[in-house]
Amino acid sequence: MMGHGNDHEGGTMTTGGDGAEIDLQLHRAHSARMYDYFLGGTTNFAPDREAAGQAMAVFPWAGTAARANRAFMHRSTRVLAGTGIAQFLDIGTGIPTSPNLHEVAQGVNPRARVVYTDNDPIVYAHAQALLHSTEQGRTAYVQADVRDPEAILNSPMLHDTLDLTRPVALSLVALLHFVPGSDDAHAVVDRLKRALPSGSALVLSHGTRDFAPAETARVAQVYTAAGTAVQQRTREEIGRFFDGWRLLDPGLVATHRWRPDGDTDPTVTDAQISAYAAVAVKP
């Protein structure tokens, strides 16, 4: 795993093993660290906070939307673990924020196995927080980009942890709006879906302009100016990610409307969330 002696403010991190340094890219904003800021976390830096502040100036509910998205991940993970799925592949993990996906899944099934993957070096720097599994279960971390699904699917770490002949819950939460049309997000998701057996699940949430077109357009401009392309998609475009799989009730809905529980704020509006979410199962 990772050694000590991290120097985040210096912008590099020394790994264990070969002692190589990884550039943490702290000079520019990164979506994972902006999301951490929206959630009230502390693993973010001046460029992240500046861009996040600009986003909140044009979309004041960014924190509300981020928390609702995180809550959707918790609810969907509990539902799937409760149905017997014991393997999870979480792509676009983000900065660890407890409870993390493996903590939720292993709270239902202590034998659950989880592979996390992200392309942000600072997520790797904090990956130790993702690797505290139950004794019966297991977690692993793969440094990779969703736009290169083969790198994820061919990772020895993934195959050491998950059995792809048994059902896997694929989690793509608040990720694909950072995969623009030129990278063909639908083809990427189709490739990942093909690799999974019958009984697997797709958990997905995605930003949209459908509910608040003006505000969300300005948010996209903030991200683009900060160096991260954003493509908010329509309900129809997001629905295509689930093609061929069976949507669980209540289907594709605003994130906070997917099986709300006692912790869901009933006063939140679709415009304040501006994202769709759904869970589907492979026949």
Image: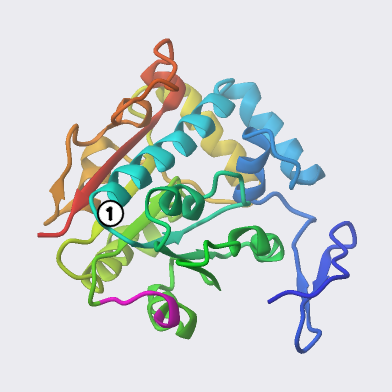
Question: What residue type is disc 1 on?
Answer: Leu
* Residue 102 x, y percent position in the rendering: 48, 55
Q: In which quadrant of the rendered image does the C terminus lie?
A: bottom left
Q: Nearer the viewer, residue 275 or 229?
A: 275
Height in image: 251 above or below 165? above
Q: Secondary structure at mark 1?
A: strand
Label 1: which residue? 202
Q: Image quadrant of residue 97?
A: top right
Colouring: rainbow
- Residue at the bottom extreme, as displayed: 18
Question: What's the residue at 28%, 76% (across, down)?
Answer: 164
* Residue 43 x, y percent position in the rendering: 74, 47
Left or right of residue 178, residue 196 in this image = left
Question: What's the residue at 78%, 56% (across, down)?
Answer: 26
Q: Nearer the viewer, residue 41 or 231?
A: 41
Q: Nearer the viewer, residue 177 or 168?
A: 168
Height in image: 135 above or below 129? below
- Residue at the top extreme, as displayed: 267
Left or right of residue 225, residue 214 in this image = left
Q: Image quadrant of residue 113?
A: bottom left
Left or right of residue 21, residue 244 in this image = left
162 inside magenta stretch: yes
* Residue 160 x, y percent position in the rendering: 44, 82
Question: What's the residue at 23%, 77% (across, down)?
Answer: 165
Height in image: 150 above or below 27? below
Span shown in magenta = 159-164
* Residue 36 x, y percent position in the rendering: 65, 42
